[in-house]
Image: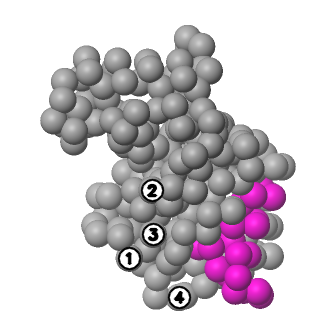
Amino acid sequence: MRVVVAEDLFLLRDGLVRMLEAYDFEVVAAVESGPELSKALAELEPDVAVVDVRLPPSFSDEGLQCALAARRARPGLPVLVLSQHVEQLYARELLADGSGGIGYLLKDRVFDADQFIDAVRRVAAGGTAMDPQVISQLLDRRAQDRPLGRLTPRELEVMELMAEGRSNAAIAAQLFVTERAVAKHTSNIFGKLGLPPSDDNNRRVLAVLAYLDRG
């Protein structure tokens, strides 16, 4: 699997490269600035990009802006964002198309290699890998919006865990309920969010993130 890494701090960038290569990823580029990232994404067409939010030259939101531009040019490009903080506006914009292949992890809450590598693989496969704090902040911001306001507290819990990329079995274990109960909650969420039965693998992503389209 081919990966582009964007991180301005040398030690962290080198550590990411070494970790990915240890798990049999091919790092085709490791860059430190926004312009280098844009060029690498356009020319190398990686399977997934691991992107720091703040890159030179602006050190503001350069990485996210490059990721957004790259996904507009290549819809569905898998991007895993690394950040110190939750940038709500850009997180919503990344997620709003509902196409999946998006992750948003907070750097100080990545506790081991297995957690990080699992997130990279899920995002590359078209799923989501969201830090619970990111989801919590996004949900809190939109909690009064329809149709989100129609969900029960338990359905919101299930939706948060779905957004993290967890399976029904993992959600059931986390909430100490049966998989059948999780399936029922999931079905209710689909119905309340106006998502009809479909074979589309991204329906779980849409169920969690459709409300973000409301700006």
Mark 4 and mark 1 residues within 8 Å of each other at the beta carbon: no
Q: In this rendering, does residue 152 appear at all?
A: yes
Contact flag, marks 1 and 2 (Cβ < 8 Å): no
Task: Name the residue carrying label 4.
Answer: 10
Q: Which residue is mark 1?
A: 108
CB-based contact (under 8 Å), mark 3 and mark 2: no
Q: Residue furthest left?
A: 176
- Please name the residue that numbered disc 3 is placed on: 106
Q: Earlier in the sequence, mark 4 or mark 1?
A: 4
The residue under the point 71% across, 75% down is 61
Magenta residue span:
51-70
- Circle 2 residue: 136
Q: Would you call the spot at circle 2 few (<14 residues within 10 Å), some (14-19), or many (20 or more)?
A: some
Three-letter amino acid code at the position of disc 4:
Phe
- In reply to whether residue 16 is colored magenta, the answer given is no
Labels 1 and 3 touching (C-beta < 8 A) = yes
Return the disc, 3 or 4, that comes first in the chain's sequence: 4
Q: Nearer the viewer, residue 66 or 137?
A: 137
Q: Mark 3 against mark 4, which lies toward the viewer?
A: 3
State the image quarter where residue 60 is shown. bottom right
